[in-house]
Image: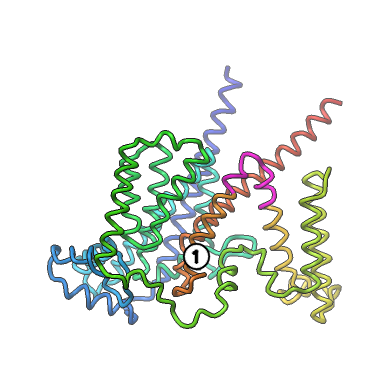
Amino acid sequence: MSDTVRPNRLRSWSNSVVAIVGIAYVVYCTMCLATAYTGSELDGDQKELIKNLNAVPTIWGTMRWWTNHWVGAFHYWRPLTCHIYWIELHLFTAHHTLYWNMVTFVSELLVQFLLALVVKQLTGRWFVGLLAAVLFAGIPSLNVSPFFLPNASSTSIVEFTRWKDQPDFWTTAATLGTIAAALSGRWGVATICAAAAPAFKENGWVAIPFTLALLGIRGSLGTIPRRYLVVNAAIIAAWIALRIITGTDVFDIQPVGHNINWLARYCGIVNGPFFGLWNNLDLHLAVCSAAIAVSILAPRLSLVSRLIVALVGSTVAAAVAAREMGGDFAAGLETLIDIRSGLQFVTTATWWIVLMAVALIDKETRILAITLAVFRLICACTVAIGLAVGTHTVFMSNLFYCALYAVALDAMWRAVKRHFGDKSLGIASR
């Protein structure tokens, strides 16, 4: 009896340690990002926001934002965002914007918690949820994460240095809240979050379709009470009606500058590390692609063999890249790791594509991985249609990318465990 209880107790303690370390790291990263705050200086957009907020002296006057575009220069319909801005201004004043940033701090932690919760609900493992949150927190000492990881920390840094981008936190939190509540059968909370998401920012319209997609994956669509379907449909109709009353200008795409190379910009956001290689169709790309294709598609290859093929192919591709660029591949380690040799890009490509391949091969993960990838593509559409391409515009997109990456890493880890577990069983059986 004690032999059975002891491993369970050990597993419980190890899970607790992992949870504490993960939470501590996310909080630490959030605090480090908060120190990136530049002070009380206001840029032009923030001054415009403050001026229009001061023009509304009472809370009742803020109700006008439900039938009018928001307080900034652009004609967005974001009534809940305007309400919170108004409250922040009257609580903290324009002279103590550091306090505004404290709202950002709490909002970031809320997003991280909800991300971990949703991924845990989808995978059944808290570790994977915490991994997604850690990836999304990034590495605070760098503007971008290492090339093996999603580029998430730079997104948060932009958010923290400009409180005007707080709507990205709130609409993301409401979207994740909708998903988390629906997956746990709390339909009232899910309805409130789904209603709030598009009222914070227009990309919150994805809350309901994303939630329905994930419920469909789990076979839970039939569990939604009919009355909540009716309520959600009524809310959507009401929001559309309010936007129409507000005026047609809130539907304008309003591209900033000329929409040049929109497809390249979009691909640069959504591709992860891999397709950045396609910017230059050189010989080393062909070598790397061939190695990746062999490692994924060749029959009767074990996982270890696939990884070896990918690694060898990457090394050969790096040598070819160095040759094309006039470098000396054998000159030493400095040349090998020099970004100009192409090794970083080739290695990144191999790592990322093998990771995704393992996730897609794994039956338990395949549909979820595809769904999260599609979510990322959809959330990055603002880049494709030519809106302001600030880093904050892909906040939600990067979040789903980190969730996808965590799920893929978990699938890869389980594949390795299965492989070596089968090997050990085979040896034991002999």
Which image quadrant for residue 324?
Answer: bottom right
Along the viewing direction, whichever of 34 and 136 lies nearer the viewer: 136
Q: Which residues are magenta?
A: 356-369
Pointer 1: residues within 10 angstroms few (<14), some, or many (20+)?
some
In the picture, measured across the screen, residue 283 lies left or right of residue 384, that is: right
In the picture, measured across the screen, residue 391 lies left or right of residue 196, that is: right
Q: Is residue 125 magenta?
A: no
Along the viewing direction, whichever of 361 and 320 lies nearer the viewer: 361
Which image quadrant for residue 159?
Answer: bottom left
- What residue do we see at 67% from left, 42% from top? 362
Image x and y of residue 58, in percent: 12, 66
Which quadrant of the figure contains the C terminus? top right
Along the viewing direction, whichever of 89 and 251 lies nearer the viewer: 251
Which quadrant of the figure contains the N terminus? top right
Q: How is the image coloured?
A: rainbow
Residue at the top extreme of this rendering: 1
Along the viewing direction, whichever of 30 and 279 lies nearer the viewer: 279
In the picture, measured across the screen, residue 284 lies left or right of residue 339, that is: right
Residue 41 to residue 374: above or below: below
Q: Is residue 368 magenta?
A: yes
- Say which residue label 1 marks: 381
Residue 40 to residue 145: above or below: below
Image x and y of residue 79, in percent: 26, 63
- What residue do we see at 28% from left, 79% from top? 47
Image x and y of residue 215, in percent: 47, 41
Q: Looking at numbered disc 1 in the image, what kind of residue is underneath it?
A: Cys
Image x and y of residue 389, in percent: 48, 74
Residue 216 to residue 307: above or below: above
Q: Helix or strand or loop: what does disc 1 sit on? A: helix
